[in-house]
Image (tube, grey):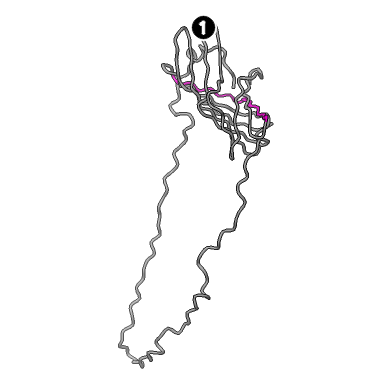
Amino acid sequence: MRLLLGIPLLVACTPTPSAAPLGWGPLAPGMRADPAVAAMHHTPMKSAKSSHATKPADSATAAVTVPVPADSARPSTEPAPKTGGKPKTEVTVAAFLGDYSGEDVAVYHIEELPDRTEKDPKARLKVTSSSDSALAFELVDSSNGNEICTLNGTLGPTGATIAKDQKCFEQNGEDASAAAKIVSGTATVEQTRLLFDLDMSFAMEMGGKKLGGTLSYHFDGKRK
C-alpha cells in the first residue's frame, strides 16, 4: 500500500464511487431440480381363454421357481465402514514466514464523504515470528519501502488472528491527522500465497473537524 501523507487528498481527490459495490460478484445461481419421472408400463394379463386351451399349471409348478438367496448370501447394499483417515494438517508458523508481494485494496467509508477505494498492484507485506504461536505482519509502503505498521497475530489451527485495538495507517500533517484501529483481522496461507484481511475503525481530524468511519483492507500476495 502507498501511504498518502497528504490527507486532504481523501477529500479533494475523492473519485465518484463505483456503481458496483467492491468485492461483490454475481450471485451464485439457484439449484435446479430436474427429477426424472420413470414411466410405469402396465402389461395386461393374458386372457384366460385362448384359441388353444392349455392345461392349468399345477399349483406347485406355478410357484416361483427361481430360488431366493438367503440373507447371508445377499449382496450388501450398506456402504462399507469408513476407515480412520488422517486429520487435516494444522498450519505452522513456518508456513507464514517470508516477504510477500501482490495487490492490496483499501476501502474508506468516512461520514460526510463519498466512499474511496485505493488499489496498489505493488503491495508488500513481511511476516516474521518470535515464537511457535506469535506472528508479526509488517505492512510496507511500496513507494519507499518504509514500514507503515506492524501488527501482531496469534496462530490458530487454520490461520492467524490479528489482535484487536492495534493502530495502523497513522498520518499526521500540519492541520490534519488520521488513524485506523483494528476491529478484527485474519491471515491465511496456502503454499506460497498469503491472504490478509483487516476491518478497522477510522478516525480523521481536519481543520478542527473530526470525522469517523471504517477502513477495510485486503492483501493477496505470493512469497518471493
Q: Residue furthest bottom?
A: 55
Within 10 Å of the Cα at label 1, are there few (<14), some (14-19), or many (20+) other Cα atoms? few
Indicate the quadrant containing the C terminus: top left, top right, bottom left or bottom right.
top right
| Residue type of the residue flagged with mark 1 | Asp
Tell me which secondary structure the magenta stretch mostly adopts.
Answer: strand
Q: Is residue 43 above or below residue 207?
A: below
- Image location of residue 96, percent across then percent down: 65, 34
Q: Is residue 169 above or below residue 137?
A: above
Q: Nearer the viewer, residue 51 or 191?
A: 191
Q: Is residue 31 above or below residue 17?
A: below
Q: Quadrant of the N terminus?
A: top right
In the image, residue 127 lies in the stretch drawn in magenta: yes
Residue at 55% across / 23% down in the picture?
166
Secondary structure at badge 1 equals: loop
The foreground one among 201 and 194 is 201
From the top left corner, tell me how far across and down residue 186 is, in percent: 55, 32
From the image, tell me which residue sits under label 1.
175
Q: Residue at x 31, y 86 (%)?
A: 48
Residue at 41 percent across and 16 percent down: it is: 112
State how many labels appear.
Answer: 1
To which quarter of the image does residue 147 belong?
top right
Residue 138: percent from left, percent from top:
63, 24
Q: Position of residue 182 (x, y in %)?
A: 52, 24
Q: Is residue 150 above or below residue 53?
A: above
> For residue 43, what is the image quadrant?
bottom left
Which residues fall within the magenta stretch? Answer: 114-130
Residue 121 is inside the magenta segment: yes
Judged left or right of residue 34, residue 86 is: right
- 50 vs 90, left or right, is left
- The quarter holding residue 93 reads top right
